[in-house]
Amino acid sequence: MITWDDDPENLRAKMPCGHAINPESLTAFCRSLVSEGKFQFFCPYTDSTTDVRCLVEWQYADIRKIGQLTDEECKHFETKISENYALRALGVQECPQCSTCCERRDKNRTSVICLICSRRPGASEFAFCWYCLHEVKSYHGYRCNNDFCGGVDPRLAILNNAVKKQVGNVSGVPSCRACPRCGTIIEHDRNCKHMKCPCDQHFCFICLSLRDPQTGWSCGVFNSVCNIAPVQTTIPGL
């Protein structure tokens, strides 16, 4: 049971995974996820005796029904889910000036031109940094020229500074990895080496190999030893 409250009078509904939660807690939990940039919802229940998490994905249709969302709440959730998916899974950023979603076509550049802002009457070309989201002084440079930025993806610092830990039977594994498909930073918390990113990519946290849909894992079962992939120096996917 997922409660987040101690009031026995509060009614709770059973989610598809079998765990129960009251509608108010469900709505608040999912609202916190979309505010953090998430677009998928996974059951947070953790067994108190085995420390095993449920992590079954909850579909938005079930959340809308069980959470008894109002029309206004539905509009908020559906808008945020779409925005978060576009930003994290499709590789676009919001223009800091007009909030239009802009795609970075040249992955070598850290600056992006907003066509909407640039086409306004009397406006000059407007470009912003992909990482710090501030206006850049010159689009033609390949790195952000704002003094406080430097044009370096902040996720690289997370990867470089991640402590080493033991994963399964292998020691010295970086505790943070970027998903090989979408670049989402994932921190290893507990259990085995096999990971599933919210974008649905399965990969090995130790060697970074991908699971083949037909043949499975090339690096062996969940607790087998494999070679440690070095710290990632580029962010995949985006």
Image (cartoon, rainbow, N blue to C red):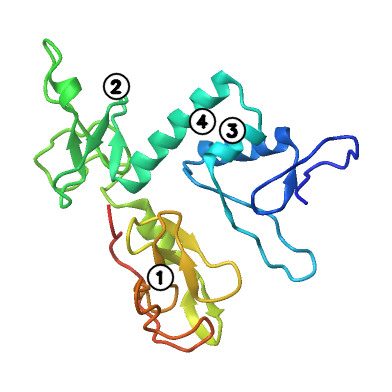
Amino acid at pointer 2 = Cys
Q: Earlier in the sequence, mark 3 or mark 4?
A: 3
Amino acid at pointer 4 = Phe
Q: In this orientation, does residue 32 appear?
A: no
Say what secondary structure mark 3 lies in: helix
The residue carrying mark 3 is 64
Counting from the top left corner in percent of width and height, residue 130 is at 27, 42
Amino acid at pointer 1 = Phe
Q: Nearer the viewer, mark 1 or mark 3?
A: 3
The residue carrying mark 1 is 203
The residue carrying mark 2 is 98
In this orientation, which residue lies closer to the viewer: 174 or 81? 81
Report crowding for label 4: few under 14, some 14 to 19, many 20 or more residues within 10 A (C-alpha). many
- Contact flag, marks 4 and 1 (Cβ < 8 Å): no
Q: In this orientation, does residue 170 appear?
A: yes
Counting from the top left corner in percent of width and height, residue 155 is at 38, 55
Q: Nearer the viewer, mark 2 or mark 4?
A: 4
Counting from the top left corner in percent of width and height, residue 172 is at 49, 82
Q: Nearer the viewer, mark 3 or mark 4?
A: 3
Instruction: Using the numbered discs, state the Cα–Cα distance from disc 2 to disc 4 in whole angstroms.
Output: 21 Å
The residue carrying mark 4 is 77
- Contact flag, marks 3 and 4 (Cβ < 8 Å): yes
Q: Earlier in the sequence, mark 4 or mark 1?
A: 4
Please give the name of the residue rendered at 28% of the width and 40% of the height, measured from the top-left corner: 92
